Image: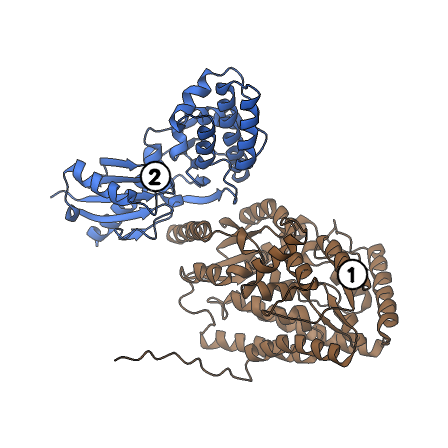
Chain colours: A blue, B brown
Amino acid sequence: MSTYVMGMDIGSTTSKGVILNEKREIVKTFLVHAGTGTSGPQQVREGLLKESGLEAEDILYTVATGYGRKTYEGADAQVSELSCHGKGTHFLFPEVRTVIDIGGQDAKVLKLDAQGRMSNFLMNDKCAAGTGRFLEVMANILQLQVSDLEKEAAKAEEALKISSTCTVFAESEVISQLASGADTPALVKGICRSVASRTAALARRIGVEEKVCMSGGVANNGGVRQALEEELGVAILYSPLAQLTGALGAALFAADKVGSKEES
Amino acid sequence: MSEEVKKQRPAPDPNSAKYKLNMIAKKAYEDVAEAKARGELVGWCSSNFPVEIPETLGLYVCYPENQAAAIAARGGGERLCSIAEGQGYSNDICAYARVSLAYAGGAEAPEQPMPLPDYVLCCNNICNCMIKWYENLARELNIPMIMIDIPFNPDYEVGDAEVAYIRSQFLDAIKQLEEITGKKWDWDRYEEVREISGRTSRAWLEATATARYTPSPFNGFDLLNHMAVMVTARGKKEAAEAMETLLKEYEENHEKGVSTYRGEEKYRIMFEGIACWPWLRVTAHGLRDRGINMVTTIYADAFGFIYKDFDDMCRAYAKVPNAINLEYARDKRTKLCKDNHVEGLLVHTNRSCKLWSGFMYEMSRQIGEECNIPVVSFDGDQADPRNFSEAQYDTRVQGLTEIMQSNKEAL
């Protein structure tokens, strides 16, 4: 009989879920743009079960991670998103030693050893600049979707400089640039650079060891990825599962748990 | 109908170190209030000012940093910070300073009242923000300020020229205080105070060093409470006796295999920085719930002063943690980590303290490398609760725990 485990990553702006089978193959993934404190986590769980054709009792173990990990009642255990992003990344790219994860409200840089264990990490300070929230605020001013930022940035030859590190000050700066007739693609490129520059500083503080990978929702933005590659001078690996890496890691922890139970 | 039975706390043992130390800390405030009521001139004193000077002269002084910590720990930090901001002080400056300036300006602080000063004693070996804070106190209250300048030390030793510079200022401070208060300096009394301060410090440092035992005979958060006596009363005989009792209790705990840390001590960390007083319970529980004991912190050891004579005292006050260079400060912390078998470092990026937080980025990196331990930092504040996020703290501490667990499993 097949056994299944679930990983739930409940973030500040999105909820993500992954189901793995006993061979650690991904059976189903699900993402909802509603985070902790909303119906998002429930929608993800229901969506995963429905689309995979599984019943709740087929799931032997669930690990929750992310900002809402502690309040999610459907989990058997909770693990920090730090360890989950590390584990998920090691599964996708075993050669990666530095993981840059930019989520909705924080940015993290993790160092992994050859076994994929997290040996150290750094997170952003209390400021929201350099996080997904920063990009959301900027996209909103520019009347764009966050998903449009990548192709807008690609149109620009030059990047306009956004010098403020504070989200609120940068918002004013972008508004005044727009009022002066600034080119939108150049502004978007500048915004991506601004995020990359702050994250690169965090990465340099902990030490960049190749190979480097980006995970989290912001990794889907090629504009930020490219800017970060230029800032750090290294190639950055990226998986289309980037936003699901935390949930994948949580599912892998759940699989470990089931595996160790079966062994005993 | 079932009746809820409220748990009765056992009456504190009056012979215990905890009871004695709490009483000394409480009495320190009462003594100053009584002196003020008698018509004596009382002072406010910065925490690393040479306490031997007011103690030898028989002066009664309070410690605004200690008051601000007490107010913040009891929930009044935001109220007083907001009052100070309303008076025009930026919320970027030290929250201890904001609390203190608000209080000096007439704000109520039932959490920890103390009499207003007739003079202030300032020493910048802990930080330079202190100078402007005390200048403003002196100007607002129209009282004299006695200032001792201790230069930042780029070397490991304190040179003779620096000792001479500090000695002359100590002697000048004594002269000024004699003139202000009418009290007279007595070198024999100084020797007594020096002896007592040394006794208190030796016992305190030996007590904190019992963390070398595994498990530690104490919960590191105890130190944050007990150190109030080191700040305010280390020159008093009762303090020396209480600290010696504390040392005895910790040694006995070790022999009996017990600890004031409740639960199993799974992990041992060093905590860096001033406590996050407004969120003390949250920060303490975030550790305790995961079996983490904060066994050591430079913050506690910073108030143990051991020296042999007046010049050596000058040297001791030039060697406090915030007055020394990064390498020396790092070596002191590395020693604490190694002596106490620390498995991780938790750094409080204290938004109030630009000096301390500023050098910690690099210093904590070096400590982590030297001791091969994970280093994790969180944002907070010593007195302003608005600079802390519980969820952010929790994620970081959980991440630290997971690394320490993984390191243990890899052994």
The kind of residue tagged 1 is: Ala
What label sits on residue A138 in the rendered view?
none
Q: Is residue A195 left or right of residue B240?
A: left
Q: Chain of mark 1?
A: B
The kind of residue tagged 2 is: Thr
Q: Nearer the viewer, mark 2 or mark 1?
A: 1
Q: Position of residue A143 (x, y in %)?
A: 43, 26
Q: Residue at x 54, y 51 (%)?
A: B387
Q: Position of residue A51 (x, y in %)?
A: 18, 36
Marks 2/1: CA–CA distance: 54 Å
Q: Residue furthest left?
A: A1
In this rendering, the answer to whether B2 lies above or below A186 is below
**SS type, badge 2:** loop
Task: Give the quadrant of the N terminus of chain B.
Answer: bottom left
Q: Residue at x 87, y 75 (%)?
A: B182
What label sits on residue B138 in the rendered view?
1
Q: Is residue A181 left or right of residue B309?
A: left
Residue situated in front as seen by the camera: A196 or B193: A196
In this rendering, the answer to whether A158 lies above or below B231 is above
Badge 2 density bin: few <14, some 14–19, many ≥20, Cα 10 Å: many
Callouts 2 and 1 on one subunit: no
**SS type, badge 1:** helix
Q: Quadrant of residue B25?
A: bottom right
Q: Position of residue B167 (x, y in %)?
A: 84, 62
Q: Is residue B249 left or right of residue A46?
A: right
Residue A115 showing in the rendered view = no
Q: In the rendered image, which residue does mark 2 sit on? A: A14
Residue situated in front as seen by the camera: B166 or B252: B166
Q: Chain of mark 2?
A: A
Q: Position of residue B405 (x, y in %)?
A: 39, 53
Numbered circles on residues, count: 2
In this rendering, the answer to whether A213 lies above or below B32 is above
